[in-house]
Amino acid sequence: MARYKDSVCRQCRRESVKLFLKGDRCFGPKCALERRQYSPGMHGQGRRSKTSEYGIQLREKQKMKRMYGLLEKQFRNIFYLADKGKGVTGDTLLKLLETRLDTIVYRMGFVTSRAEGRQLIQHGHFRVNGKKVSIPSYRVKAGDEITIKEKSQKIARIIQSMESHERRGVATWLELDKNNFKGKVKALPAREELTMPIQEQLVVELYSK
């Protein structure tokens, strides 16, 4: 399977926005975007020409894709699923992305990034409603309970992640029981509860051409 093997910090610099791909590093002075607020590469600081409408839409799609750590085919398939569903396509797209298990464990603070969440899920550290789930793209539903396997509750990076995440808080549509290493999806997120700097309508327009 294809993977992105370069520094993920380059992606934030390319999109000129923090994508929070490196955990706590993104909140400190070592954040690459804070130190170099221009695109990577030898021409990163050069003057750019005016971006076309297509270019703006493309950059928004790339930003979303990179934020959630997806390849092009994965992202496109999720979009088509959202397009076939009921309601506003852009809102449905965000809900489908946010209710992936790798994003849920990240939002609950069990991991510092979605990439770390995918790795720990694949290694079998999480349970959904008491059952082992090792698929990062597993779709979590309202009312589902996510727990950390008992033996995995002693893993240092999980403990450290939960301690640092406590300072940032948990999304309003989620519930966290830190002492028992478990969380619950109270409801599917409403668009106003998703505060990322994303203009999903631009992505809809791009794929609708």
Image (cartoon, helix red, strand yellow):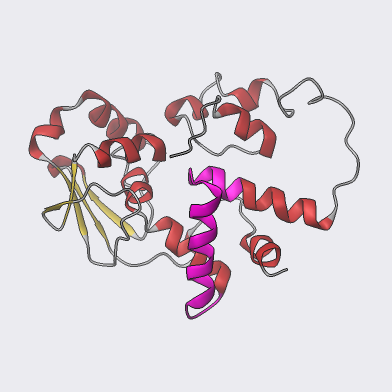
Residue 8, above or below 193 = above
Q: Residue furthest front?
A: 1
> So how many labels did they put on this image?
0
**x, y percentage for residue 136?**
32, 48
Q: Quadrant of the C terminus?
A: bottom right
Q: Main secondary structure of the magenta part?
A: helix
> Which residue appears at 32% of the width and 60% of the height?
139
The answer, for residue 16, to whether it is visible in the render is: no
In this image, 20 relative to 168: left or right? right
**x, y percentage for residue 33?**
64, 27
Residue 113, above or below 28 = below
Q: Residue furthest left?
A: 150
- Asked whether 13 or 35 is in front, the reply is 13
> Which residue appears at 90% of the width and 31% of the height?
47
In this image, 81 relative to 173: left or right? right
Residue 48 included in the magenta stretch of the image: no
In this image, 157 relative to 103: left or right? left
> Which residue appears at 57% of the width and 27% of the height?
9
Residue 74 included in the magenta stretch of the image: yes
> Which residue appears at 43% of the width and 28% of the height?
24
**x, y percentage for residue 53?**
82, 57
- Asked whether 20 or 179 is in front, the reply is 20
The answer, for residue 159, to whether it is visible in the render is: yes
**x, y percentage for residue 98?**
42, 56
**Span shown in magenta:** 63-88
